[in-house]
C-alpha cells in the first residue's frame, strides 16, 4: 500500500511541476520578466524558507489577474490544481474509511 501511495504522490508532484514549468514559460512569453525572476528566486529560496510560499502565491495572483481572459494562460493553473484536488479527494476517502473502523 505504501509503495502505491508513494508512486501516486510522485506522479501528482510531477504533474504539478509540469504545470509550474509551463507557467514560467507563459510568463516569459508575456514578457513578465520581473514576475518570472521573482518566481525563480522565491522557488530557490523557498526551499529554505517556507514563508516565501506566500510570496509565490501573490505572484501567481498578480500574473493570472492580468491575463485571466486568455484560455491558454489558465491551463497551467488548472494543471497545478488537479493534483491538489485528487489529493483532497483521496484524503477524504481515507478519513471516511478510518472513521468507519
Image (cartoon, rainbow, N blue to C red):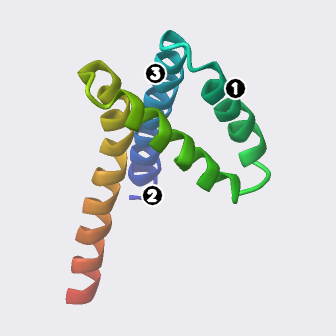
- What percent of the width, then of the height, locates residue 5? 40, 53
Q: CA distance from mark 1 to mark 2?
A: 38 Å
User: Visible in this render: residue 101?
Assistant: no
Image depth: mark 3 or mark 2 in front: 3
Q: 70 and 6: which one is in front?
A: 70
User: Which label's residue is closer to the chain start, 1 or 2?
Assistant: 2
What SS does tag 2 mark? helix
Q: Residues within 10 Å of mark 3 (few under 14, many from 20)?
A: some
Residue visible at 68% across and 38% down? 43
Q: Residues within 10 Å of mark 1 (few under 14, many from 20)?
A: some
Indicate which disc residue 2 carries. Answer: 2
What SS does tag 1 mark? helix
In the drawing, does residue 96 fall left or right of residue 91? left
> Which residue carries the number 1 mark?
37
> Which residue carries the number 3 mark?
22
The image quadrant of residue 16 is top left
Q: 78 and 69: which one is in front?
A: 69
Q: CA distance from mark 1 to mark 3?
A: 15 Å
The image quadrant of residue 96 is bottom left
Residue visible at 66% across and 25% down? 34
Q: CA distance from mark 3 to mark 2?
A: 30 Å
Residue visible at 25% across and 88% down? 99
Picture mark count: 3
User: Visible in this render: residue 79?
Assistant: yes
What SS does tag 3 mark? helix
- What percent of the width, then of the height, locates residue 32? 57, 20
- What percent of the width, then of the height, locates residue 101? 24, 89
Amino acid at each position: 500500500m505504501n509503495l502505491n501511495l508513494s508512486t501516486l504522490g510522485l506522479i501528482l508532484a510531477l504533474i504539478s511541476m509540469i504545470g509550474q514549468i509551463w507557467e514560467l514559460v507563459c510568463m516569459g512569453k508575456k514578457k513578465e520578466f520581473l514576475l518570472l525572476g521573482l518566481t525563480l528566486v522565491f522557488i530557490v529560496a523557498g526551499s529554505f524558507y517556507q514563508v516565501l510560499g506566500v510570496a509565490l502565491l501573490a505572484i501567481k495572483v498578480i500574473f493570472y489577474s492580468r491575463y485571466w481572459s486568455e484560455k491558454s494562460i489558465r491551463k497551467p493553473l488548472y494543471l497545478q490544481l488537479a493534483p491538489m484536488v485528487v489529493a483532497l479527494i483521496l484524503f477524504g476517502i481515507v478519513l471516511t474509511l478510518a472513521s468507519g473502523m
